[in-house]
Structure formats: structure tokens, C-alpha cells
Amino acid sequence: MVWILSIAAFVGATLSAIAGLGGGTLLIGVMFAVGLAPVVAVPLHAAVQAVSNASRALAYRHDIDWPSAAWFTLTCLPLPFLTAPLIARADADVIRLILALAIALSLMPGVSSALHTQWPTRRKMLVAGALNGAVGMVIGATGLIIGPFFLDRNWSKETTVGTLALCQTVGHMLKIAAFGMLGFGLLAQWTLAVPLMVAVAVGTLFGRRLMRLVSRKQFALLFKLVLIVLALRLAFSGGLGLWARY
């Protein structure tokens, strides 16, 4: 399992280094697909993705829109602590189906971007922060859900990638704190956490180099194919689990 998750973490970080997002969804999907319970997968995912996003935020620190990150944090801050108790009672099969649906929706061309790109930046950040804080505690990965809110006509690609990475780092750190208050520590999972953190750090460096060799169009196609397969695997696993019980 460690090797499977480490490969997923490396590939996900590589994808995120090129496209700015998506790697977290890939990693949490694989975590659920290999059978990790939500109470284990979500805190572990938060720790690993905090490292991945922090490394990207550091790389693009001069391009970050700091006021937007502050508005995001304002609504994101309280919600992980309010929704954390739900994760202990979360149904893994239902979460697999929700995540499969979220991936499918994210792959529909123009749907999410058409809804959010015309909003004022402050409103987009406030809504994105609220979504990240509330939904992130249950499904873990929110990059493909809140990503469209960071599509701003006045932002460069570097500003989009850097600001999203910083906001995701804040969201993951808040999740870690919320789980810590409930007694879900990461020390018990260090044998998984350490290899995955190393994998995402290496994947980020590799992705930045790969960006110069592979066109975004080619990589986007590969990325979509991977997510389609992952969504089908999650939908099948979650549906089969619910069918067996009911």
C-alpha cells in the first residue's frame, strides 16, 4: 500500500506542479480506492497536501494575491472545527460516490468556470473559503471544486497557481488542527505520512522540470484520462459497497 500511495502522491504532485491543481483529488481518490477509512485518509491527505501546496506557494510567493488569500481564510477558518465531528461518522462508500461525482463534474467543460469567473474576486474568495472549510473535512480534496473560483481575468497563471496553493495550504493546516483537537493525531500514521511527503516534494520539483518538455494540452489529456479511470473505480467501489449492505 505504501508504494501505491507514494506513486500516487508523486504523480499527483507532478500534475499539480504543471496544472496548478488536481493532484490532491488524485491522491485522496487512490487513498479511498485502496481501502483507507475516511478518519485515516482525510487527516493523512491534509498533512501530505499541506507540504505539496506549501512548496508551490513558496515557489510562487512573489505572484500571490495576498488580499484574496486573506478573504479566503476569513470564511475557511471556523468551518473545519465545526464539521470535524462528522468525519468519525462518515460512510466511506458514500464519500467514494461523492468524490466520483465531484471528479466527473470537474471534467465537464465550461460548467464550473461559467458559474464563477464573472463574480467579483472578493465574493469568489469568500465562497471558495467556505466550501473548502466545510467540504474539505468530509471528502478531503477540494482543489477541483474551488479551483474555478481562482480563474480571474486579471491574474496571471503564476498568480492563480500561487494564490490557490497558499489557500489550499491554509485549508489543509486548519484541517490538521481540527483533527488534532478531536484526538486524531498523525504520529500514528508516520510510516505512511513520511514517504508520501517525500514523494510530493520530489514530484513538485519533477513537475516544474517536466513543464518545459511536455505541453499543457498533452498533459491535460493524460490527467483527464487518469481522473476518469479513478472516478469509475470510486463509483464502482462505493456503489458495490452500498449494494452489499442494502
Image: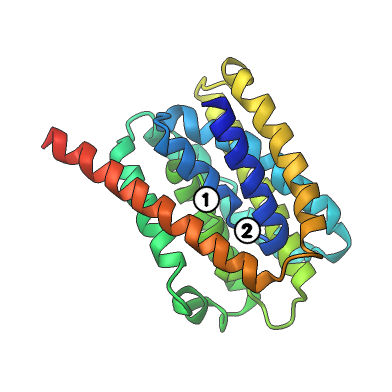
Say which mark, if any, is on residue 25.
Answer: 1
Res 215 → quadrant: bottom right
Query: Relative to residue 30, is residue 124 depicted above or below?
Result: below
Res 34 → quadrant: top left
CA gap, disc 2 and disc 1: 8 Å
Horizontally, residue 155 falls left or right of residue 135, namely right
Name the residue carrying label 2. Answer: 21
Looking at the picture, which amino acid does disc 1 mark? Thr
Q: Position of residue 244 (x, y in %)?
A: 15, 34
Mark 1 lies on a secondary structure that is: helix
Q: Residue at x 53, y 29 (%)?
A: 179
Q: Position of residue 231 (x, y in %)?
A: 39, 53
Query: Relative to residue 74, is residue 194 depicted above or below?
Result: above
Residue 29 in sight here? yes
Looking at the picture, which amino acid does disc 2 mark? Leu
**Most distant residue in the left direction:** 246
The C terminus sits in image quarter: top left
Residue 78 or residue 119, whichever sits in front: 119
Res 90 → quadrant: top left
Q: Position of residue 116 (x, y in %)?
A: 52, 76
Q: Give the colour scheme shown.
A: rainbow
Mark 2 lies on a secondary structure that is: loop
Say which mark, if any, is on residue 217.
Answer: none
Q: Residues within 10 Å of mark 1 (few under 14, many from 20)?
A: many
Query: Relative to residue 64, is residue 176 depicted above or below?
Result: above
Q: CB of mark 2 within 8 Å of CB of mark 1?
A: yes
Horizontally, residue 244 falls left or right of residue 28, namely left
Q: Residue at x 58, y 70 (%)?
A: 149
Query: Relative to residue 154, is residue 192 depicted above or below?
Result: above
Q: Position of residue 222 (x, y in %)?
A: 56, 62
